[in-house]
Amino acid sequence: MEIKIDPSEEYFRDVFAILKNLKYQQLRNRKNQASYTIHLYPPEKRMVDKQVIFQNIETEGVVSWDHENGAYGATGGQQGKPGFTASWILELELKEPKFSELYKKYKIAFGESGSECVVIHDDGEIELYLEGSSYHHKFGVNTHSFNLLHYLAEYPGQLKTFKKIEDDLGYSSRQARDAATYLTNELGYKGTSFLLTDNGFKLLCAVKMA
């Protein structure tokens, strides 16, 4: 029987936190491998909960690791001294499509189905994480594309009309469209979950400034 995810329960919040950590590593590394540190001694009082989580998601075919190397299938070896900060680093393999299916299920249950992220760096580097893929490009900090994205990032989820963009940035509707086109082309993103175009532009994903 399928387990109902209850966001009010601590166990499911822990599972979702772990899944988000693994998803972030998957996107950053661009491969289905991730490491996870699990503390076996105090002060990590909920170690047993994490052990159960990993055993459960392994049973579901979501992750796998080498059980012959250390306690709880840890392959990274023991660190620290018992009673202080000892831990194991789990070198996990994420099993697709099971991992993405479970991650999506938790995102929906927690109301974060639109929680994918665009990371904007001060030096012009843009990182886009959407639909299980990652996109990167470094723009000039004075380009229309970077300035438009930075401007929209100040108002996530809000539609900025072409008139408002022209008033605030001085870009005509044609210049704004060209800037948005160049932005998505250079990032290599062809989907529809990044920018909404409707008499203006709106960011459809979460924003992080770095």
Image: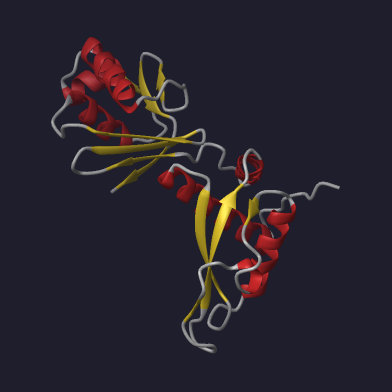
Image: 43 above or below 201: below
Residue 173 in the figure: left or right of residue 10:
left
Expressed as whole percent of the image width and height from the top left, the position of residue 153 reads 32, 36
- Which residue: 24% across, 19% down? 179
Q: Position of residue 171 (x, y in %)?
A: 18, 18
The front one of 81 and 172 is: 81
User: Taking 22 as reference, is 4 left or right?
Assistant: right
In the image, 184: left or right of 9?
A: left
On screen, 208 above or below 37? above
Residue drawn at (51%, 81%) of the image: 86
Q: Nearer the viewer, residue 108 or 22?
A: 22
Q: Looking at the picture, how far across and down is residue 180, in whole percent?
A: 30, 20
Q: Residue furthest top?
A: 174
Looking at the picture, tell me which residue is in the foreground, 176 or 26.
Answer: 26
Q: Is residue 159 visible?
A: no
Q: Report x, y in % for residue 127.
A: 34, 39
Outermost residue on the front side: it is 68
Q: Is residue 76 visible?
A: yes
- Against 154, is 89 above or below? below
Number of numbered markers: 0
Looking at the image, residue 62 sits to the left or right of residue 201; the answer is: right
At 36% from the left and 24% from the top, the residue drawn is: 188
Which residue, as the protein is rendered here, is positioned at the far left?
142
Q: How is the image coloured?
A: secondary structure
Front residue of 102/205: it is 102
